[in-house]
Image: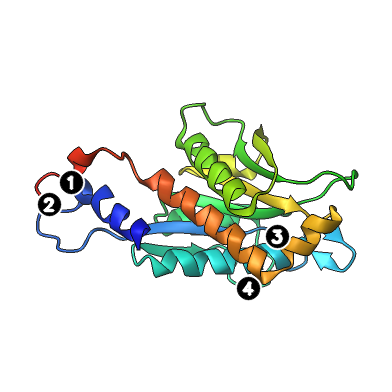
Amino acid sequence: MVLSLALSGAFRGGAPPSATEPPTLVIALDAGHGGVDPGAVAGDVLEKDVTAAITTRLAALLEDLSRFEIVLTRPADLTISNRDRIAVAEDSGAILYLSVHANASDQASAHGIEVWVDKSRALDDDSYLLAQHVLETLTASTEGRDRGIRSGDLYLRHADMPAVSVEVGFLTHPHERERLLDPVYQDAVARGILAGVVAYLEPSESPVADEGS
Ligand SMILES: [Zn+2]
């Protein structure tokens, strides 16, 4: 498919001269919450279940590209500290950390998509570039409302790699909650995030990169 073709040129410069295969890139995916921590609760809907479904789908889509090794920081419904999630990502040599969450608000009308970056990150940190790509492709894929890139005091500050937290929608918004429970919409969310990750990893659209291939 088009995405994998584009990627095949993207990392050629980094491959050892003798290598016939481009290097596999490790991506850490984090399904927010889990175990005793349900995250946001809206009726009988638990955030941890929504984040697990979307993250599982996203992992499968990334693996289909055959260029990535996916590390799941929470591979099942387990209680795992945020520190341990980061440690799993760092130990695996992940080049980016992407956490999936669903939002909640006292205002039932609140809806849409946000991508968060820890406030300790400089504006030229790659986390912002990743956030920008994911927000753009995710809102396009879902037609969800763009609530922008946000920064706050997050545990992501402990990650030694670009790290973002994606709030894929509001469980407190009746229509958005319904969509987030729909596997078809979950697939659209996963594909939206996927496209953002791939766009982030493509350093340039310059045709010069393909010279001599
Ligand atoms: Zn959350």
Q: Distance of mark 1 from mark 4, alpha carbons?
A: 41 Å
Q: Is residue 198 left or right of residue 191?
A: left
Q: Distance of mark 4 from mark 2, alpha carbons?
A: 42 Å
Q: Is residue 124 left or right of residue 113?
A: left
Badge 2: how crowded within 10 Å, few (<14), some, or many (20+)? few
Badge 1: how crowded within 10 Å, few (<14), some, or many (20+)? few
Disc 2 designates what residue? Answer: 213
Question: CB atoms at circles 1 and 2 under 8 Å apart?
Answer: yes
Q: Nearer the viewer, residue 120 or 63?
A: 63
Residue at 57% of width from left, 39% of height from top? 157
Mark 4 or mark 2: whose residue is earlier in sequence: 4
Question: CB atoms at circles 3 and 1 under 8 Å apart?
Answer: no
Disc 3 designates what residue? Answer: 33
Q: Position of residue 119 (x, y in %)?
A: 61, 31
Note whether ligand 1 is within 8 Å of mark 2: no
Q: Distance of mark 4 from mark 3, alpha carbons?
A: 11 Å
Q: Residue furthest top?
A: 123
Q: Which mark is residue 210?
A: 1
Residue at 84% of width from left, 60% of height from top? 41
Q: Tag 1, which secondary structure?
A: helix
- Specify the amino acid type for callout 2: Ser
Examine the rendering and report whether any part of residue 48 can be seen: no
Q: Tag 2, which secondary structure?
A: loop
Q: Distance of mark 1 from mark 2, alpha carbons?
A: 6 Å
- Specify the amino acid type for callout 1: Asp
**In this rendering, the label closer to the viewer, 3 or 1:** 1
Q: Is residue 206 left or right of residue 90?
A: left
Quarter of the image containing the N terminus? bottom left
